[in-house]
Image (spheres, rainbow, N blue to C red):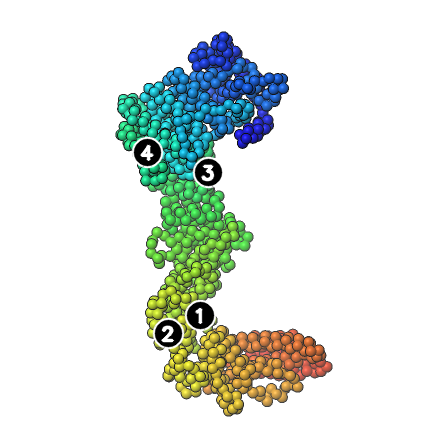
Amino acid sequence: MHVGLKAVNDLRRTRNMDFGSWNICEQTLVLQGAFLLAEKLVGPKTLLEAIKSDWLLIEKPVTDALKEISSGNGPQSDEWKKRTFALLWTKVLSCRPGLSMKSEEDIERKWKEDVFFPVGNLFPKINHTIFFELLKTTKSANIFADLLVALPTGFWIEEATLIVQHICEETSVEDVTFFLDLWWEIMKNNNQKDETTLLFSTVASSYLLQASNETSPSSKRFKPDPEYAPTPADSLLRVFLEGLRTIKQHIVHCKLKCYTVANLADVLCSSVIPEKTSESVPIWLYLEKLAAVVYFHSTTGKDHSLLDVIKEGERIVQSRSATSRFRLLRGAQHFGLDMLKDLLLQWNDELQNYMDDGKEIGYEIYRMADSLYSLHKMLIASENTETFPEEQRGSALELAQCISRLQEKTSNILLQSTLSDGEMIASIAMNIIDERLHRYEEVCSVFASETTWAFSGAWMNCFRKNKVYFRVPDLIVSLLETVLKVVSTQKSIDMKEIRRATDVILTLFTELSLTDKDKVLSRVLSLWGNEGLLHSLNAFTDNFQEELNLTFNQISQSTADYNASKAVSRVARLALLHPEAVINKACHFAVVNDGAHVFLGKILTSLPALKFKGTKSAENSVSLLTHCLINTCWGKLSSPKEESQFLSLLTYLMEPSETSDNTITTSLLQPEEVVRTFVLPYILDESAHVELCLRILHKAVCIPTTKEPFSRHWLVSCSPFPLLLSLCKLLNSYTKYWQPSDKPYCLTLGCKELIIDLLKLVCNAIIPEAEHAIETWNKSLFWLHRKMEHLDWVVCLRLQPIYGEHFKKEVPASLFEMCNLSENEWTPVDFPEYGLGTGLLAWLECCCISVEMKDHMLSLLSVNTQDPEEVNLFSKGFLVAMIQVLPWCCSTECKLLIQVVSELLKRQVLHVPYTLEYVQHMPLLNLRPFAYNLQFSILLLRGFQLLCSSSCSEWLSHEGHKHIAWLYSSCVSDMLDTVKQTLSRCNHQLQQEGKDTDYVQEVLFIYTQVFCHVLHIIAMMPDNTCEPLYILSLEILTLYGTLRPADTSTNSLLRRANEKHFLKSITENVSDDHHRATLMQKIGKI
């Protein structure tokens, strides 16, 4: 049923074809005449009744006619020959019993459905005998094979059995040759169907379906394993094996015996290989086999084009591979193994004498030797596998031994065949590439790497013509290797050709995708190192420096508009020639050109190959990119701007990058490499680069990590405990920050904040290591604790997160006077600097360590608020402690200190009284919501009065006063933000309660009082230290002026005049003329 449906579908397709070329014409009339004459010659019989012996009577007219219509050398002649046999075979099938046309309707239907009928109807009826003899006489086994396998597979056996039976009757030498040719052609068939084959398949199938009542004879010799039901291909090969068994006594000539052994060995080769095995013949051996076919065809004297012979060679090689359509199943394999073994035992002496008679080796000898060699390898390789079932392994081993004995004579034959002409192999390879024949991609690989062919005229023509096939990373690398090998080894080579080839190769590289460019660049780096191709190709890259400068000049002139993909492509091409020079240029360019670091970062991250670390196996070797950053940037940054751009570039390169297809890739620079290169060598020795090192370390540690479960943080590989010690030493240096120093560098208090954050980040990163390596962790902790003994106790407390329960917290003994500290966790130490009455100072220093420590200290603080004397003493002591701590605070510490003040004010533990000076200006206002803000401002004022008093006049340096002015400005600015938020909240609450009042007057009063406090502090501070305070005063006036119109009370104008007069009166005391004038102008506009 399935075969029938397929035939109907094929018939429908053929109706859409152009059948004009199959009409009656001169050629068909010549054939008609020949067959009409043949029927007369065979009379009184008809051609339908002719037998094998009758062929001699009619051979000449029929063969002469076929020669006449197929004469010539072009494809047209071969086409007519194939058409003739297609017509004749369909004629034979139409003449089978039961298929005669009985009515005019049958004839009409044939005219419509049978493409061959108009021509075939001219011929007398013929049988299979005439058809087979014509095939044999004209040596057309290849045509029969093509037409046979074009039939539905269900009819293969029937037609093949008929022709084998025909050969086995009155067998002659010609019959044997035809049998072997036919067998081999079927094995070589690659199922490529031309128009003639398709038409024949459709028409012949329809005849075969109509005569399906006839059963095809099958061999009784084989009893296939029920587990391995025979396939059509297996059954077809069985027919030829059975035929060989029948005619082997007629194979007397040694040439035919070689042919027979080769056919049988090829069948077994393709059958033994597992079906899923990929092509196993190495490409160079494949080319050698093709060369052998070409060579032996050239000795036959037949006129075939090189391309046709190569295609024939392809079919031959494929017939023995796993890709062959025709394979024996296990039952037939056993039969084939035994048959080949018997033939070799029977013919061994004859075959050896034939090969050893000193004559020139013929193709049949080479093919037999090659087939047996391949089969022997497979048999030996399968000895300990399950390729053969148990019952076949004995036969396989015996056959392998028989082949071994014969190989003593065939080994020299194979050796001679491998000494093929190099020019011939090159010519074959180029033809395969030109015509895109089988395995042409692999041949391109040979073409690209074979130095003996390179740069000849034919090689260059083939390369230019087919350059698109070489646009593959591996092939481009092979071509570059070939160029370098030829340049270094061949002195007589035409350098112009090499230059042209190099230009083409580099053009192919630029046409690759970004991913493929990176693959090539990676291979170039691994093969030729940091200098790339330039060292060996210097003669062909004269304009490299000029092109390098031009590329980066174009980028610098239009960074924003320059096409990113074009820039990456040009940079990649230059990097292929000299990676180190290009990256040096890019790094320098990114640092010295404002804003270029981002664009250059994108370009560099587009080429992950730049992570290349060279051929050294040392773990501490740096990548090419890091090496270039050291050479061009490190130690050569001449300004803070360049440092900032260098830091931004490093950060960009450390972050995971996104490719053009939106996939996230690993970073170009690993944070651990950056830290080991740019941080550890300098921060451990406290060099002049230490501030930049801290910023680099902070950026690296803040890069998000995609840690696998149970994996170690990369910081663990960067000497974390020595790093912590160095950070603590740097932090410890701030205890003497305002003292004169002879160090070549000076860290800012901004760096202190960075160090504090780094300590926390590093501790958090390495704490999980305590669970993975307990012994190493404990040793490292004790080492660190011992090294920290001489550092300030506050610095040591910052390491408590990693100390855990190993060590108690060591604090001044005076702290125990302020808090109820547990002796299980805390240890009192008598520090000389912390005598009697310094407990509050130590307590406040603890509060500035961290939020957690601040909250803990506040919870432990014990002040009796019922005792006014104790509250007064605490408040005075707190003010003194605050001014002792504040000048050494960074921004983070200052905010913690302010939070402590706020909490103490809310608890009413800290008492900050208003002075009469301010009370007399206070109208009847509700200042309760803003009491803490006003108290805070007054507390700071009192603190500055103490700092600027004569007793502390020499305590702080000029820069110290600038710093506390900046801290004060920051604190008050934050406080004013809080006031605005409180105003908004209180007004909203009053509106919800339905009250027609607001807190605008209260906030205006706060602004005037704070402005007054600021000007008081300006008056007390040393000259040239008050710039932040001056800016703050302008900010307060702006806030006042913005809020003033919101006061809509009845006497608002009077209050505005009074407040304006008050602001001007206190502003007149500002000593700096410029500041005073600006402030007066600002007040005048309110």
Residue 975 in view in this figure: yes
Identify the element where label 3 is drawn: helix
For mark 3, what is the residue? 469
CA gap between label 2 and label 1 equals 18 Å
For mark 2, what is the residue? 806
Depth order, front residue of 291/427: 291
Q: Earlier in the sequence, mark 1 or mark 3?
A: 3
Identify the element where label 1 is drawn: helix
For mark 1, what is the residue? 760
Q: Nearer the viewer, mark 2 or mark 3?
A: 2
CA gap between label 1 and label 4 equals 74 Å
Q: Earlier in the sequence, mark 2 or mark 1?
A: 1
Q: Position of residue 568 (x, y in %)?
A: 48, 50
For mark 4, what is the residue? 396
Q: Earlier in the sequence, mark 2 or mark 3?
A: 3
* Residue drawn at (48%, 83%) of the image: 861
Residue 839 marker: none
Q: Are marks 2 and 1 in contact (CB under 8 Å)?
A: no
